[in-house]
Image (cartoon, grey):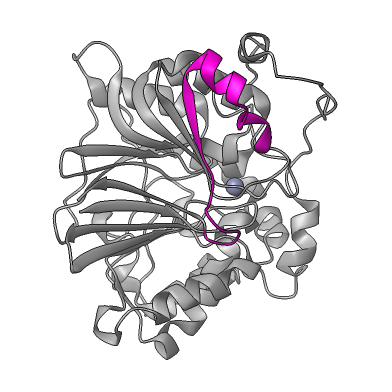
Amino acid sequence: MFTIELLPAEFGDAIWIEYGKRGAPHRILIDCGTNAVYPAVRERILALPPAERHLELFVVTHVDVDHIGGAMALLRDREQLGLTIGDIWFNGYVHLAPGGKVPLPEDDDILGALQGEALTELIMAHNPARWNAAVGGGALVVPDEGPLAPLPALPGGMKLTLLSPTQRHLDRLRPVWEATCKKAGIIPGAATAAESGLLGEEGEPDEDDDILGDLNVDQLAATPFKSDAARPNASSIALLAEYDKQRVLLAGDALVPVLMDALARVRGKVRGRLPLAALKLSHHGSRGNTSLDLVKAVKCANWLVSSNGKQFKHPNREAIARVIKAGGSGVGLHFNYRTEFNDVWDSASLRRKHKYKTHYPADEGMGIRLELSK
Ligand SMILES: [Zn+2]
């Protein structure tokens, strides 16, 4: 079996993945939403029998509050929950320079290297040997050149290929690391996560919210694409997950040019669109993170959007229109909340005209679950 679930993570991501034998699945968690999202993740873990409270992998894609907020609460609570974690993937301050590695506990300058950053301290307290262990404690970065291949498989056979970030984008985060961590509330004494969320990313200009009748998908899709350039997003981990002949692109908040380059290197000499079972849209369906070219690079039936629309009014209509327009017929849109920003796509005439389907949570606060194989 292979399932992917977008937990209700406010304006962030918390992606719960199960794979393996039915009745004895392996689990991966990618990000943990904002601080306020943690109680739902906690419930989820507590619902497991104590012997099953194990994550093969916990990924923290990057240091924005909507991905990292709940991660700290989870790690603080880990022992109380009886949760064990096989490996934590997170590029910390030590990884922002080429060759940077997880420090050894006996390193004298460890505090300097940590920069007082709370998530790193929690990971070190958990077990430094299980931090980016898949790459020997180094940075999780896409190699500079050559075809891209999966990292050593996780227990149970899940294969993950890194699609983002590149070392260049990690280097560029270095000068703004401290400010970014402060904004995310992960430097002690800085603004709380709730306050810092309001400081968030650069605001995007408002679009016309008062369009009457159906949207003009062609026009929206054709809006010139301007790539997101936020340095924290550029440092985001993005992964291609493969299990049971199903491939899923988990884009984090990564940038389109980085993803495009990586997809070309995954495809290698194989021509045409890369077949995918699902794609989690980058940056909650922001117009700056989904281009027509990216949509055309894959053949994908299920497009997942994680956002309650707060803060940044995601998903943007241009991004969804590009998916509908270039994704081919039978595109399915999966939203983990029903909001005023994604409700517009639940129009029978639009669905008929552009041949796509929509999926919303059956109940508020449930998130959405996709079964890729039984
Ligand atoms: Zn985000």
Q: How many numbered marks are there?
A: 0
Q: Position of residue 338 (x, y in %)?
A: 63, 47
Q: Where is residue 277 in the image (x, y as percent from the top left)?
A: 30, 34
Residue placed furthest toward the bottom: 80
Q: Where is residue 115 in the image (x, y as percent from the top left)?
A: 59, 67
Camera-side residue of 107 and 118: 118
Q: Residue at x 35, y 27 (%)?
A: 300
Q: Which residue is drawn at 30% across and 16% down?
A: 273
Image quadrant holding the N terminus, namely bottom left
Asked if 349 appears above or below 343 in the picture, the reply is above
Q: Which residue is drawn at 56% across and 61% down?
A: 68
Asked if 129 appears above or below 67 in the picture, the reply is below
Asked if 348 appears above or below 140 in the picture, the reply is above
Residue 311 appears left or right of 158: right
Is 30 colored magenta in this rendering?
no
Within the image, what quadrant is residue 298 found in? top left
Using the rendered image of the protein, determine whether residue 235 is visible from the camera's viewpoint. yes
Residue 23 appears left or right of 77: left
Q: Position of residue 275 (x, y in %)?
A: 27, 25
Camera-side residue of 210 and 40: 210
Using the rendered image of the protein, determine whether residue 291 is visible from the camera's viewpoint. no
Within the image, what quadrant is residue 69 found in? bottom right
Camera-side residue of 226 and 51: 51
What residue range appears in magenta?
342-366
